[in-house]
Structures are given as C-alpha cells and as structure tokens.
Amino acid sequence: METATAARPSQIERFKGPIIEWLVWLAIAGFAYWQTIYFAKDIVGYPPGAAGWPRTICILMALGATGQLLYKLAGHDLAEPAPAAAKETHTGAHRVVQRLAIFALPFLFLYVSPWIGFYVAAPLFVITLMLLLEVRSPLAIAGVTLIVYALFLLLFTRFFFVALPNGRLDGFYEVNNAIIGFARMGL
C-alpha cells in the first residue's frame, strides 16, 4: 500500500511540467488571437479578412501545444537525452543563460532584419537558434537551414509576394534584392 501512495507524487510531478507548459502556450495563443480583433477588417475577395492568417497561426499554435502535451503524457519525451559528459559540464547557470539567449534571439532577429534584410538574417537566425539548442551535427544544421530558407523563399516571394525588409545598409540591400530576383525567376 505504501508503494502505491509513494508512486502517486511522482506521477503528479511527471504531468505537472507538461501541463503548465501547455497552459502557457494556450495563454499566448489565446492572447494573440484576442489581439486580432483590432485589425479584423474585410478584404474583397478574401472571406477570412485581414485577421485570417494570424488567427490560423494562433489555432495551429494551440493545436501544436495540445499535440505536444498528449505526446508527453503518453510517456514520450521530446528532448533527446544528452550524453553523460555534456550533462556534467552544464550547470544551472549555463542553462539559465542558454534559455535567456534563446528567448532574446527572436528580438535580436527583429532588430537586425531591417538593417541587413530578412533574406540575409533568416539563415543566420536559424543557424544560431540550432546552435543554442545544442545541435552540433553540421549535416543537420545545413539541412534544416536549407529547408526552412527554401520554405521562406517559396512562401514569401512566390506565393504571397510579401514585402519583407531588404536591408538599409549598403551591400545588404543589393544582396537581398538578388535573392528575391533569384527566387522569382521564371514567374
């Protein structure tokens, strides 16, 4: 009987973290969805209106968080176990700095993009994020960066024709325009 009661706190502790994480993601998605009421205008020929894509992204974020919660509650762990040597070298302070850097990186990306251009900053952002997430395989870094960058180019330059920052600094403006020209070749 004592072993059954001793196992219960560990089950509660096991589920507590993923559920809190899920609630935080739902709160972020819900807040962002709520903010779309401020620009929900009708667009001729586009029934979802101006808030259509932001709302879709918020719903996908909530669905992704729910899927991740269900995956974790099923007993799977999304994080790969680190090698024993790596665990010994990472202290609590290292983890805090790493998490702060991961949190600050998107803000740095948003600050730098108008200066050097989105098409130059995007691959640098992806590579830096992967390094901060401790991905060390050059093949994985190159593969993910190429796939994400190709999707950016395909979506923003060929499908949506979205004007993203081209860069204000000399040289970067020309490089970004050359990348856009290359991506739109054949249209």
Image (spheres, rainbow, N blue to C red):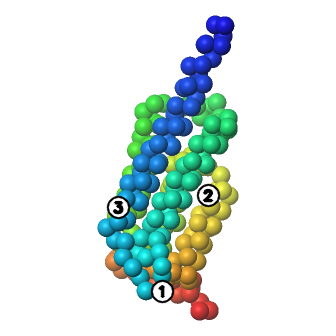
Judge whether residue 13 can be spotted in this image.
Answer: yes
Q: Is residue 58 above or below residue 21?
A: below
Q: Amino acid at mark 1?
A: Gly
Find residue 118 and report its horizontal and vertical position in percent: 44, 72
Helix, strand or loop at disc 2?
A: helix
Residue 64, numbered label = none
Which residue is found at the position 54% from the left and 72% from the top? Answer: 152
Q: Nearer the viewer, mark 3 or mark 2?
A: 3
Which residue is under mark 2? 141
Q: Is residue 109 above or below residue 68?
A: below
Which residue is found at the position 51% from the left and 81% from the top? Answer: 160
Find residue 7 and report its horizontal and vertical position in percent: 63, 17
Residue at mark 2 to residue at mark 1: CA–CA distance: 40 Å
- Which quarter of the figure has residue 109? bottom left
**As drawn, is 116 to the left or to the right of 160?**
left
**As drawn, is 142 to the left or to the right of 38?**
right
User: How many neighbours does mark 3 have within 10 angstroms: few (below 14), some (14-19), or many (20 or more)?
Assistant: some
User: How many neighbours does mark 2 have within 10 angstroms: few (below 14), some (14-19), or many (20 or more)?
Assistant: some
Which residue is found at the position 52% from the left and 87% from the top? Answer: 181
Q: Nearer the viewer, mark 2 or mark 1?
A: 1
Which residue is under mark 1? 45
Q: Amino acid at mark 3?
A: Gln
Residue 35, numbered label = 3
Helix, strand or loop at disc 3?
A: helix
Residue at mark 3 to residue at mark 1: CA–CA distance: 23 Å
In front: 74, or 132? 74
